[in-house]
Image (tube, rainbow, N blue to C red):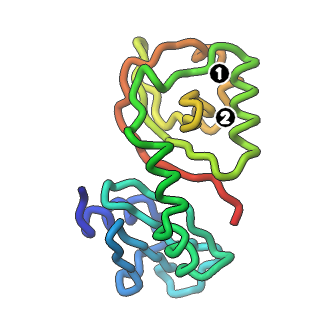
Amino acid sequence: MITREQARAQVASGLPGEWVLDDEATIERPWGWVFFYVARSGEPLFGNAPVFVDREGRVLEESGTAMPVEYYIDRLERGSLLQRLRRALSPLPRSPTLRFPTSFKEAQRVFRRWDRLNGRYFVIADVRTAARVLPRVTFDAHTNIAVTFEDTPLAHHPQLWSVPIVEVLRVERWRLTTDD
């Protein structure tokens, strides 16, 4: 469990320098917090969806700007997103469950499926292989197969196919792909 201050620091560390958290707008709920951010200059921001953080420190990115924030809070509290999140991600996947694709064909198939579907959970993690540490590898949480590394599909990284993951060092954030 984390505190409000720890959650705030986590969100603030991910904001660009020209944005700041609007502490007065923060909403606290039993499951966590909703943080809002604004431009440091005071100019309006467009598309700045609030950031939902649960009490475990996971950033839940199910919100958007198409609807009022109460809509996303209601969806979360009714359990549709929270239950799906807990079912899909709990317990946190650890090696050897997380893995790299074994071939070009598998890498393409997983990436295409992951890239076009909404409602897909994924995780960004730092992992250790026998040879080196790989930062910010994206894994599809449904298949536990790596999808991207260095912001490019794994199909472009044949040197990583079938490489065993020795350890998951750090999970940066859990996400849910969505267009609403």
**Quadrant in the picture for residue 114:** top right
Which residue type carries mark 2?
Thr
**Quadrant in the picture for residue 6:** bottom left
Q: Position of residue 132 (x, y in %)?
A: 42, 19
Q: Which residue is mark 2?
A: 152
Q: How many numbered discs sit on the rendered protein?
A: 2
Q: Position of residue 91 (x, y in %)?
A: 38, 39
For the N terminus, the quadrant is: bottom left
Instruction: Locate residue 122 relative to residue 37 in the image: left or right.
Output: right
160 relative to 42, above or below: above
10 relative to 130, above or below: below
Which residue type carries mark 1?
His
Asked whether the beta carbons under mark 2 and mark 1 sit within 8 Å of each other, the answer is yes
Element marked by disc 1 = loop
144 relative to 50, above or below: above
Instruction: Locate residue 126 relative to residue 144 in the image: left or right.
Output: left
Residue at 35 percent of width and 66 percent of height: 31
